[in-house]
Amino acid sequence: MKIALLFSGQGMQHAEMLPWITPAHPLLLQMQEQLHAPDWRAAMRDANWASTNANAQVVLTACALAVWQALQEHIPALQAPAQTLVAVAGYSIGELAAASVAGVLSASDTIKLAGLRAALMDQAGAGQDSGMLAISGVSIRTIEQWCEAQGAALAIRNGPDSAVCAGPRSKLAALEKFAQEQGARCTPLAVNIASHTHWMSSAAQAFQEHLEQSKLSTPRLPWPTNAGVWVHNAATAAQALSAQMMLTMQWDSCMEQIEERQPNLVLEIGPGRSLATMWNQRYPEIPARSVDEFQTLDGLQRWLSRWAG
């Protein structure tokens, strides 16, 4: 069996996600202590709490790594990652979890870093009324030109006709109105900062300085990075994790690199199924599903076995 793992980004988190995670998992307990939230699911029922950058990034990272450890414990095929996983990749904050699974960071340190990452991004965006807007249905080049014309920035490249833009909300409102008039599909995202743009440059610099003083290791698995940085040691791992905060995310390139490794299947780890959907639309011959679609680990294991090849 050859599997590729995709770790979800921010925006789809909710209180009932990933229902089969053990509540007493050590990483979830660490997350609750770090966020001063005795019951993270109860806290997530408050929409404002759940969408706050400082909470969402830590919750997503802890849940992703807790799920991965549960999968390794219960699914024999995943107990030897070097033999089974052909690549790991993460979408935005999901890249921290991907780096951890690749062997760059311990799970516990990764959760702490998620909190630092969010704090630095909030600091960089302080005093700015910013957001993010998904646009699809027109060419990526057209979307980029619209961003430039309206004073926004291209934040994420999802595919040839799909992207996410970021910037001041006033600029995004004008961009959304114009794009809709041109027949494009627009979806405002529940994010309050201009991630993956130059507005986050101070956060990226501070995060890299911290990572360079941290205990990072060379990845043991192929890890296509959001910023397109080729990671071959701890220093370039630090560069990749920080650069993606202020540079356009190249998710389309991440998917291309994974497809080149010809996995039997792709598994998204996190809430929702946005990454699995993107994958299935682009590479329908290689099936993809999200762990959030399954009510039990047994159901997930049956699906993995079916496509193991």
Image (cartoon, helix red, strand yellow):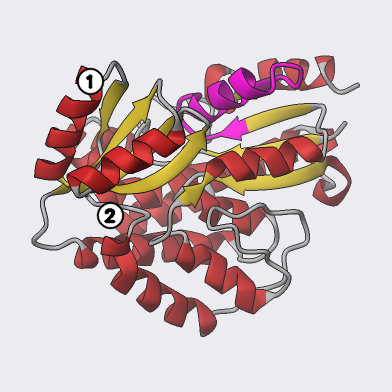
Magenta residue span: 268-289
Q: Is residue 280 left or right of residue 249?
A: right
Q: Is residue 138 left or right of residue 215?
A: left
Asked if residue 129 is positioned above or below residue 106 in the image, the reply reads: above
Asked if residue 298 is positioned above or below residue 169 in the image, the reply reads: above
Mark 2 is on which residue type?
Ala
User: Relative to the observer, which residue lies in front, 94 or 48?
Assistant: 94
Q: Which residue is mark 1?
A: 180
Percent x, y of residue 77 = 84, 35
Asked if residue 203 is positioned above or below residue 73 in the image, the reply reads: below
Q: Which residue is mark 2?
A: 54
Which callout, 2 or 1, points at the residue further toward the start of the chain? Answer: 2
Label 2 vs label 1: CA separation? 32 Å
For disc 1, the neighbor class at 10 Å (few under 14, some 14 to 19, many from 20) is few
In this view of the protein, can residue 67 be seen by the observer? no
Name the residue rendered at 44%, 29% in the picture.
139
Between circles 2 and 1, the one closer to the viewer is 1
Name the residue rendered at 46%, 25% in the picture.
272
Q: Quadrant of the N terminus?
A: top right
Percent x, y of residue 260 = 79, 39
Q: Quadrant of the C terminus?
A: top right
In this view of the protein, can residue 201 be seen by the observer? yes
SS for callout 1:
helix
Mark 1 is on which residue type?
Gln
